[in-house]
């Protein structure tokens, strides 16, 4: 499914500002979800009501409101600051994820050179 495949049915409910379909960083394959951002929140609410559980591209879609806007490259590289939500509010800190993130290390790491003692 492409952004245009989503734009056509969703723009029936109001002006669409952006459509983002995340892909797997390593494979380039779609991750199975996306974001449709409307210019007006009222249009998003109507689209959610009317498009939830519809089929697009042979797949049933489930619509939930995103909690935050996508970060700009400047926000991704900066520390701290405010993040604005899709419904117009802002908060200083993001809430912690519901489940702890796990980081995996590759078992094929090369050995680091020995550390020099600076004392």
Image (cartoon, rainbow, N blue to C red):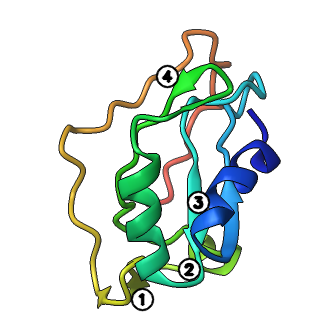
Residue under numbered circle 1: 81
The one nearer the camera, 115 or 15, is 15
Which mark is nearer the camera, 4 or 2? 2
- Disc 4 or 1, which lies upstream in sequence? 1
Q: Is residue 103 above or below residue 21?
A: above
Left or right of residue 80: residue 89 = left
Name the element at disc 2: loop
Whether tag 3 and tag 1 are in contact, CB under 8 A, the answer is no
Which mark is nearer the camera, 3 or 1? 3
Q: Residues within 10 Å of mark 2 (few under 14, many from 20)?
A: few
Residue plotted at (24% across, 50% down): 97
Report how many numbered discs are placed on residues in the image. Answer: 4
Name the element at disc 4: loop
In the image, farthest residue toward the top: 107
- Disc 4 or 2, which lies upstream in sequence? 2
- Is residue 35 something that shows in the picture? yes
Residue 112 in percent (x, y) is at 63, 29
- Residue 62 quadrant: top left
Residue under numbered circle 3: 36
Residue 42 in percent (x, y) is at 41, 80
The one nearer the camera, 42 or 74, is 42
Q: CA distance from mark 4 to mark 1?
A: 30 Å
Q: Residues within 10 Å of mark 1 (few under 14, many from 20)?
A: few
- Disc 3 or 1, which lies upstream in sequence? 3
């Amino acid at each position: 499914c492409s952004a245009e495949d989503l734009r056509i049915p969703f723009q029936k409910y109001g002006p669409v500002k952006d459509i983002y379909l995340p892909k797997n960083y390593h494979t380039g394959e779609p991750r199975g979800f996306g974001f449709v951002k409307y210019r007006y929140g009222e249009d998003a609410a109507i689209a959610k009501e009317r498009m939830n559980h519809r089929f697009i591209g042979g797949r049933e879609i489930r619509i939930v409101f995103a909690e935050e806007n996508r970060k700009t490259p400047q926000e991704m590289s900066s520390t701290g600051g405010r993040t604005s939500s899709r419904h117009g509010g802002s908060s200083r800190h993001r809430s912690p994820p519901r489940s702890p993130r796990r980081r995996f290390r590759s078992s094929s790491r090369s050995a680091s050179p020995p550390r020099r003692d600076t004392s």
